[in-house]
Image (cartoon, helix red, strand yellow):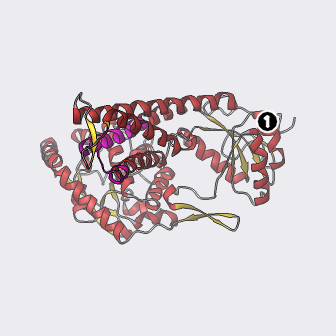
Amino acid sequence: MTALQRRPTVPEEPPAPPGDHGHASQVRAFQGVLAAGDFVVITLSVTAGHLLKFGFNDPSIQDSNGIVSLSYLPLSIGLGLAWWLLLGAFHTYRQRLLGTGTEEYQRVFQATFLVFGALAIASYLFKVQVARGYFLAVLPIGLLGLFLWRWVARKRLVHLRRRGELISRVLLLGGAQTAADMARELRRRRDLGMSVVGACVAGPNPGRVLRGSSVPVLGGAGDMAAVLEQLDVDTLVVTGSPDLSAQEVRRLSWELDPARVNLILAPSIVDVAGPRINLRPVDGLSLVEVAIPRFDGSKLVLKRAFDLFSILCLSVIVVPVGLIVAACIKLDDGGPVFFRQARVGLGGSEFRMWKFRSMRTDAEQVLDQLRRKQGLQDAGNEVLFKMKDDPRVTPVGRVIRALSLDEVPQLINVLTGEMSLVGPRPPLPREVTSYEADVMRKFMVKPGITGLWQVSGRSELSWEDSVRLDLYYVENWSLTEDIRILFRTVKVVLARDGAY
């Protein structure tokens, strides 16, 4: 039996549709629904702007000499059509933009401001007096409506992909290790809508399946064309391999064109956000430039200002809630309200982190007993000690932990500059002793009350995933990402995901 005749099933992957006949038509249908929704949103926003400014009247537009040129009705129709067409011209419906990243929203923003900027310039050049109230009503309503609609559509798309619909069939081509790493990442990120159905490995034969996965190895680089035809694949992902030259990759792109198969080149970099990656064509070479992250100057000032402003806004809610929690803790067992614990922060320096006490006063003394006690295993991972139904937690502590209210006093650490609202988890000193060298990079920024790992599973994450998310945050920090994490934190806290 040849490698091409073997076609093992991949049980952990969602079922993929049968190639282009199913996937492409589903994608086109989704793009059509998205465009129709944009048209409805634009129509409603233009209508709402007109009604807010003029009611049910249709006044005329005059130039600087008082001469009537046209009414607002044809202007509204023209504005709406131009707006909708520009969304298509800016490629906001491209398949690669749907479901992930911020580029889709950026293009919607750019198309919107181009059409309104053109309207403002035309009004100035032709000295036509367009009512500013009409202009200022349509723009925010329409932009907010488009963002909201795109967000709803994205949530629906991710749900469909996780259910096994709108899935692109992917063939991997590259080295055994790089292909295995890519298969693992694509399986983890099912929201990307890419199901790996097989791999062609350049170089020594790694066996029947990629290491650490159930993805079948269907041949070498020379077998790729036959495998593509047999599996009806619509996307080829090429990973790095010393046995795969640049000339071979170029010939691949020529072979894929008649078959209408998408080609994706995966560089040997992971967990690097899009804004840090730039393509630099140099004399026929496509070089990928990765910007080195900087943690000084204006970035630090901006992050500190955002922290202080956010605390000021939150104080109206936080202060009364904190007083209620403190009273409940005191009335429960009469012990101290706060618990201060040594943690490691910026630059590896230690500080004392504030929390509402959620455990018995002798919790630290019985920790070693719990670790040794037979049958009680760490529910989190090898480094972080987290236990479901921890007997050290008080009744009040169980409630405030479920609602994450025990973290509220850490705002004191934010005010004193030892922590930030968003950042990597501040570890215990004993945890740091078991860190590998790569993990120490998380101390380049201040630790946070919340962070990527808290909104991505919290205590249910493995140690490796916790580290990966913390390092991703450090490498790709932005104020926009901080705001997004804070909103996700509210959702996670309300859902009580992974809290114990």
Name which quarter of the figure residue 130 lies in. Answer: top left
Question: Looking at this view, is 473 or 59 the one in front?
Answer: 59
Q: Residues within 10 Å of mark 1 (few under 14, many from 20)?
A: few
Q: Residue furthest right?
A: 1
Q: What is the quadrant of the C terminus in the image?
A: top left
Q: What is the quadrant of the N terminus in the image?
A: top right
Looking at the image, residue 20 lies above or below residue 107:
above
Residue 472 locus on image (x, y percent):
47, 56
- Residue 130 counted in the magenta span: yes
* Prevailing secondary structure class for the magenta stretch in the rendered image: helix
Figure disc tally: 1
Question: Looking at this view, is 57 or 21 the one in front?
Answer: 57
Q: Residue furthest bottom?
A: 297
Residue name at image x 31 percent, y 36 percent: 72
Residue name at image x 71 percent, y 41 percent: 261
Q: Which element type, helix, strand or loop, lies under badge 1?
A: helix
What amino acid does circle 1 point to? Glu
Residue 460 locus on image (x, y percent):
44, 43
Question: Looking at this view, is 60 or 227 the one in front?
Answer: 60
Q: Which residue is mark 1?
A: 229
Q: Seen in the image, is 218 located left or right of residue 335?
A: right
Q: Seen in the image, is 337 located left or right of residue 293?
A: left
Residue name at image x 49 percent, y 50 percent: 465
Q: Seen in the image, is 18 located left or right of residue 451?
A: right
- Residue 264 counted in the magenta span: no
Highlighted range, magenta: 121-150
Residue 100 locus on image (x, y percent):
50, 44
